Image (cartoon, coloured by chain):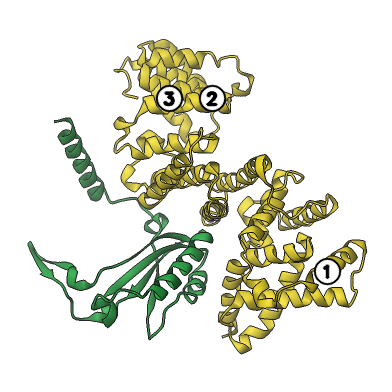
Chain colours: A green, B yellow
Amino acid sequence: MRFMVLVKADEQTEAGRMPTARELEAMGRFNEELMKAGVLLAGEGLRPSSEGVRVRFEGDRRTVIDGPFAETKELLAGFWLLQCASRDEVVEWIKRAPFDGGAEIEIRQVFEAEDFGEELSPEARAAEERMRAELERRAAG
Amino acid sequence: MAADAARAIEAVWRIEAPRLIAGLTRMVRDVGLAEDLAQDALVAALERWPGSGVPDRPGAWLMATARNRAIDLIRRGRRLDERHAEIGRDLRARQLTAPDLAAAVDFPVEDDLLGLVFMTCHPVLSADARVALTLRLLGGLTTREIARAFLVAEATVAQRIVRAKRTLAEARVPFEVPGGEELSERLASVLEVVYLVFNEGYAATAGDDWTRPALCEEAMRLGRVLAGLAPREPEVHGLVALMELQASRMRARVDRTGAPVLLMDQDRARWDHVLVGRGLAALQRAQELGGALGPYALQAAIAACHARARTAQETDWAGIAALYDALAQLRPSPVVELNRAVAVGMAFGPAAGLELADALADEPSLAGYHLLPAVRADLLERLGRRDAARAEFGRAATMTANERERAVLLARAAGAADGGGPSPR
């Protein structure tokens, strides 16, 4: 099973404060533990939302909104993608992460292909095939 | 609340058990005793933690508890048969110079873990025993989980593990990381075990759908652990690459009716691109370490050719044929030859492929293997020899045990008979 571990932003990450050497070292050690246990699939830190952008959908309209975004609690500062045998195991791993100061980490299980039961909808498949054909046409041209 | 604590302890156990057992094996030099001690510590945790809460460093707590029990055991002279007396002397001797407990716990565990891997995968054990013991001691799986995964009785697995531990003790298999030449040799046995576990999950045709992918995941996790423990060994990265690339296709391998979908017909959008990326990266590490690629890395390189092709038509068949050449040199087998025939047929035309496939006609190990006539039929059809193709498709259909596959082969036999245009594949 895969789990997305979401690290919430706070004022400091949003202000673009870079981690101290000590914090980096602690996080590096934790990442290494995850890696050595074979559970780490991916993980990255995110730049502050002031450098981010949102695209809002309404009918046919697409509105592009530049960051920063106000509601800090909803924002992310980083993520891990972990493969573990249970949610409890992920919780146990995350309890070992070097956070402090009221940090909140959210753990969400990733859908597996089986969860969808059926494969991609025929529409999505058709769109995918059109895109492929177009890419091929361009590559050939 | 107690149930929560029990689940938390189970999670701690899965994370800590391998390191715990590895560290204890270093102390007592007996993997069976080490597991008993670790289990005792787990029982102590189950008694204590629901009340006190899980300690901040649960691994250190378990290790301290297990170590104290080991010392008690020796002091009380319980189970003082010859073997344990020896362990006792050994322990006491080492305690004289032993660093304090915290240092013992913080001791770099890499060598211990690697030592444990080499022990559980020791060639003195049968393949079945190696697999069971590795999943138990390194995977932290229960006997029940292993039994479920391999569709055998729990008692069988339990017996296998007990016997394996006894064999290791009787053969006095040392707890060590072999050096030099022996390392690569012994590592081959370890990699074989991991790949066996992976294939058991990947090639599963029966059983519980939930358990089998879990087995693949466990094998991949063990592979990644090994890659961390032996980062200079290209074949470890080769095996990791092979498993990640094969697993990346898992969800595209069957259609909505559950029928198998051949590689060339798979919807590549459904491949798992996180795993593809990880597989390609692992292969690159294997290649960067230099030297000729080993069998796992070669198979991974073949899988990578497929993974890199955006569409089936873009497949680098000449590259795959060259890799099969290398694999045939290294690990010659009729199945490799047959795959080479397919690749050569795709890269250099059906006549070249057919020549290789025909050379396998009298191969006894392929008698009854439906893919030999199926491959010949495909090549014959592409050469325009429709009657021969029809006969071979028909022959293949009678040889497969899989209903769906039979239907596909019969349809192709009928297609060849119709004189329809040559198949694009």
The residue labelled by disc 2 is: B328
Image side of residue A105 versus residue A122, left or right? right
The amino acid type of the residue labelled 1 equals Ala
Percent x, y for residue B362?
60, 14
Closer to the camera in the image, B208 or B243: B243
Q: Give the residue at x 42% y 43%.
A: B284
B51 or B106: which is nearer to us?
B106
Q: On screen, B206 above or below B299?
A: below
**In the image, what residue occupies the spot 80% across and 75% down?**
B71
Q: Is residue B157 visible?
A: yes
Secondary-structure class at tag 1: helix
Q: What's the distance in space between the residues labelled 2 and 3, CA to CA?
A: 10 Å
Tell me the crowding category of disc 3: few under 14, some 14 to 19, or many 20 or more residues within 10 angstroms, Cα based: many
Extreme residue in the front direction: B97
Callout 3: chain: B
Residue position marked by numbered label 3 in the rendering? B321
Residue for point 44% across, 67% down? A28
- Residue type beneath disc 2: Ala
| In this view, B127 is above or below B33 | above
Q: Which residue is mark 1?
A: B93
